Amino acid sequence: MTEQRITEQCVTEQRREREDVPGHPGGARGAAEVDGAWEALVAAARRTVSDGLVVGTSGNVSVRVGDTILVTPSGVPYDRLTPDDVTGVDLEGRQVLGTLVPTSELPLHLAVHRTTDARAVVHTHAVHATAVSTLVTELPPIHYMAGALGGPVRVAPYATYGTEELARNMLHALAGRTGCLLRNHGTITYGTTLDQAYDRTAQLEWMCRLWLTASSVPGLTPALLTPEQLAQAGERLRAYGQPGR
Ligand SMILES: [Zn+2]
């Protein structure tokens, strides 16, 4: 465990620090934005557990506020995170908020925040998605919701967790997409809001479950969408949003 509970004195210092969030000069308003973003981040991290996308603390979430990346700390159960546990780094990974150790998967989050318009990133070890990552190099286009992720979802080649090599592999797999699978590891998605990033993870896990279900019927092979069908669905999703919303 790397948990380092902060003392009351540290809390006071941290609050003072937070009033000048790097890259987000806004005084008390900036601090309020950080507090609100942290609250939403903790709620999303807890939801990954209650929705069955994560077991224990094996997933992580990040949210960008200005040039500060708020991120789940390493090894602390999400139900024990408090408003005073705000953990933040700059785009180079230097800790600028809090004293808890940032997630060991930080390179994945930083790579996405540096190279895309992401405001939030969600990483999980969701079981169906991780199973699919061991079977194929691309999730077969079984459902048009792949259009919501930019097209057929690729699988990034395996590399040790927490390494720059894995971050590079992920960025290749994410080209033109807002989500991908990581071989023998899990999922990563991003969005312009935390809700959007979270929803994309849930949709990705659902599509993987769907493909595993359909492709496990003996003697039958699931029908797949053509690139044209997927492109048309993608255009419609961008224009009208998701059905039922
Ligand atoms: Zn992971």
Image (tube, grey):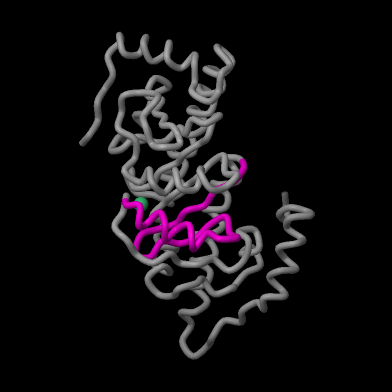
x then y, percent, for residue 189:
52, 52
Q: Can residue 42 be seen in the rendering of this structure?
A: no
Q: Can residue 28 be seen in the rendering of this structure?
A: yes
Looking at the picture, tell me which residue is in the foreground, 121 or 91.
Answer: 91
* Residue lying at the far left of the rendered structure: 1
Looking at the picture, tell me which residue is in the foreground, 55 or 229.
Answer: 229
Span of residues in magenta: 163-192
* Residue lying at the far bottom of the rendered structure: 219
- Is residue 229 found left or right of 106 in the rendered image? right
x then y, percent, for residue 58:
34, 47
Q: Is residue 107 above or below residue 145?
A: above
Q: Is residue 106 above or below residue 38?
A: below
15 in the magenta segment: no
Total number of numbered discs in the rendering: 0
Residue in the picture at 48% in, 28% down? 38
Q: Is residue 147 above or below residue 91?
A: below
x then y, percent, for residue 25:
56, 18
- Is residue 80 found left or right of 70 in the rendered image? left
x then y, percent, for residue 98:
36, 23
Residue in the picture at 55% in, 23% down? 24
* Residue lying at the far front of the rendered structure: 92
In the picture, the quarter occupied by the N terminus is top left
165 in the magenta segment: yes
- Is residue 230 found left or right of 120 in the rendered image? right
Residue in the picture at 35% in, 59% down? 185
